[in-house]
Amino acid sequence: MTTIQNVTVLGTGVLGSQIAYQAAFHGIAVTAYDISDEILETAKTRFAGLADTYIASKYEGAAEGKATAALDNITYSSDLATAVANADLVIEAVPENLELKRSTYEKLAKFAPAKTIFATNSSTLLPSDIVDFTGRPDKFLALHFANQIWIHNTAEIMGTTQTDPEVFASVVDYANRTGMEAIEIKKEKAGYLLNSLLVPFLDAAAELLVDGIAEPEMIDKTWRIGTGSPVGPFQIYDVVGLNTAYNISINQGEKGAAFAALIKRDYIDKGKLGVISGEGFYTYPAK
Ligand SMILES: NC(=O)c1ccc[n+]([C@@H]2O[C@H](COP(=O)([O-])OP(=O)(O)OC[C@H]3O[C@@H](n4cnc5c(N)ncnc54)[C@H](O)[C@@H]3O)[C@@H](O)[C@H]2O)c1
């Protein structure tokens, strides 16, 4: 088993930034990679915001200096070869688009050293859909985090039939060392455990909206009161981020088309991306 110490995260969006910061907080040397220096500048602001969030959430040790110290554990690169040159583990959190993921792994396979384990954070794709593009099927698996990682700290770990059990064990160990609850999944399943439950729930809410049955506020209120859950589905959409919600709906083909069109027209095209932009189905205080 490898003790993973150097981690590169591909993509500094909603989840990539959280994955990178959580690792840095727990003492991992993190390289944050994104496609431009401009995006990486935005990421720096996002990481500073996460430091504040960890302190505000009373994450253990955050107020005692760990939250700001974590920022020093992150380096930035928009050059893929440099970003992965010393990585024990690359966690890929690029947009949920199969072709983009495949082409990302093709490039990654060329640049990463032989030792590097690749993990996808894909929400809905199977590692089997990607494995042939990795050039190292034995060192590839899914490591799936939930949004708001500092509170919802599941790390679902799911290999293909080709994943080396030692690699799987190394990633379980990494998850446990970085403040996560490692969830070991026995067989491939699109959506893992969490999204196998969550996505049909969110789809049902989307259908209620698209069919004109009720507005988001009413749907959320019903769920909260009726089940005692603290949040309703559209509050969850805002946390997930509407770009990802859009991509997931598009990937569903005809079934998701109407909701994808609605969120693009009424939200994404107006810059309303959910909590991350301060407005989605609801508005949020600026971060
Ligand atoms: N948002 C969620 O709640 C959530 C939860 C779990 C898993 N995920 C998964 O994480 C992945 C990323 O989702 P997100 O919500 O963070 O998306 P996002 O759109 O917020 O961020 C994607 C980031 O990837 C960057 N990017 C684009 N092309 C790239 C490339 N070729 N190489 C490197 N970076 C690139 C973008 O610039 C952006 O910073 C998806 O696979 C998604 O399914 C998302």
Image (tube, rainbow, N blue to C red):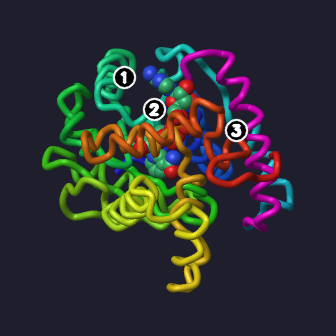
Q: Earlier in the sequence, mark 1 or mark 2?
A: 2
* Tag 2 residue: 94
Whether the residue carrying mark 3 lies under 8 Å from ligand 1 is answered with no
Q: Position of residue 181 (x, y in %)?
A: 48, 67
Q: Is residue 198 left or right of residue 43?
A: left
Report which residue position mark 3 lands on: 73
Q: Position of residue 97 (x, y in %)?
A: 35, 32
- Whether the residue carrying mark 1 lies under 8 Å from ligand 1 is answered with yes
Left or right? Give the position of 60 relative to 207.
Answer: right
Q: Nearer the viewer, residue 268 or 59?
A: 268
Whichever of labels 3 and 2 marks the residue nearer the N terminus, that label is: 3
* Distance from Cα at disc 1 to Cα at disc 3: 25 Å
Label 2 CB less than 8 angstroms from ligand 1: yes
Quarter holding residue 118: top left
Visible residue check, residue 89: no
Classify mark 1: helix, strand or loop.
Answer: helix
Mark 3 vs mark 2: give the one in front.
Answer: 2
User: Where on the picture, by quarter, is residue 257?
Assistant: top left
37 magenta-colored: yes
The residue lying toward the viewer, choosing from 264 and 122, is: 264
Residue shown at 79%/41% (left/top)?
48
Residue type, label 2 = Val
Res 122 quadrant in image:
top left
Q: What residue range appears in magenta?
A: 34-59
Kindly report the distance in space between the C-alpha atoms of the residues bearing marks 1 and 2.
8 Å
